[in-house]
Image (spheres, helix red, strand yellow):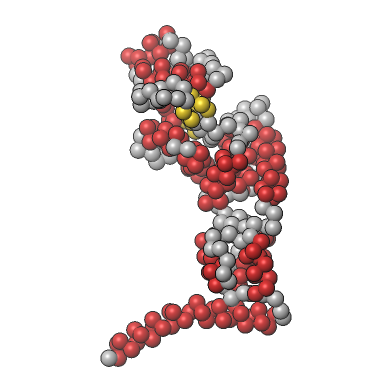
Amino acid sequence: MFSAEVKREIEAVAREAGLEPAALLAIAEVESGGRAFALISAPPLSGNPLAGPRREPMIRFEGHYFDRLVGDGKRARARAKGLASPSMGAVKNPASQAARWEMLEQAMAIDRSAALQSVSWGIGQVMGSHWKALGYGSVEDLVAEARSGVAGQVRLMLLFLETNGLVGTIRAHDWAGFARAYNGPRYKVHRYDSRIAAAYAKHRRGVASAETGDILRRGDRGDAVKDLQRALTAAGYPVMQDGAFGPATAAAVERFQADHGLGVDGIAGAATFGALAKATKGSPAPRGLAWLLGMIRRMLPLAVRIARMRTGRKS
């Protein structure tokens, strides 16, 4: 299971991308087995030894990829060492991540680029061979992203999801459609769809229980966000009521927080909701007046600039 720190990092990246945190957590958990890192004591890819163990992303080496990508003059050597085969699954991955990293080091000694492309990297298990399709300058750049930390691993996974048009299936909670595209036609054999659905339900409950007091922030969507937008508008901070907590809603929350002596973080928590309730308390007429005053306050700087421009033209 992911640690609380890893969960927070995944949730933060999900919100920044406008995705439901529970959905991204579920996919990441199923793909990685709930582990973001392994402790590896062998020297790093650069070849410089370290004093102690280091954290590395979870990897899986695919020998049939290596067999296809390695140079013709090196393929026989790779096959002789048991690192390459034309048959998928013929090269078995060791159970431990440490042994898998040792396997990768051996393959890199034969052909570094082909070896790095033959590995699925990190939380999303994205193949290194996708580096060009995902817009990286080289496979080394993709690997550096995966090794940079949890956020880097999740960014890599999101880039793959966006590039392959899978964000819509995630938002629709179409786990079968997602698993078919992400895990291949045999996804049912490994129950990827049902496992993601179960993980989503678990994380959805976890996120809801953690966010007591209806905490809302960027990336959240739904009726609760629409209610927040209505309250902001009624309080004199007009914003489109579309149910999507985007940059405009975050800016409105920050302005409200600043004007009411609250901590300015753009997150609508208990204190912000309490202040909004006080600001909008009363009959519809005062709320309408507050909205009008808010509009006037927002338009006033523009009106002043226009007046100054006109005065400048006359002089």
State whether residue 251 is above or below residue 210. Answer: below
Name the spot of residue 109 as percent of width and height, x first: 36, 18
Quadrant of the frame with the C terminus: bottom left
Residue 134 location, quadrant: top left
Residue drawn at point x = 35 percent, y = 24 percent: 48
Say whether residue 22 is left or right of residue 57.
Answer: right
* Residue 62 in view, yes or no: no
Image label count: 0
Residue 169 location, quadrant: top right
Name the spot of residue 222 as percent of width and height, x first: 65, 58
Name the spot of residue 297 as percent of width and height, x first: 51, 79
Q: Residue furthest bottom?
A: 315
Residue drawn at point x = 38 percent, y = 10 percent: 76
Q: In the image shown, does 180 or 203 lie closer to the viewer?
A: 203
Quadrant of the frame with the N terminus: top right
State whether residue 2 is above or below residue 81. Answer: below
Q: In the image shown, does 79 or 301 lie closer to the viewer?
A: 301
State whether residue 162 is above or below residue 229. Answer: above
Q: Residue furthest top?
A: 80
Residue drawn at point x = 39 percent, y = 81 percent: 305
Name the spot of residue 312 as percent of width and height, x first: 30, 87
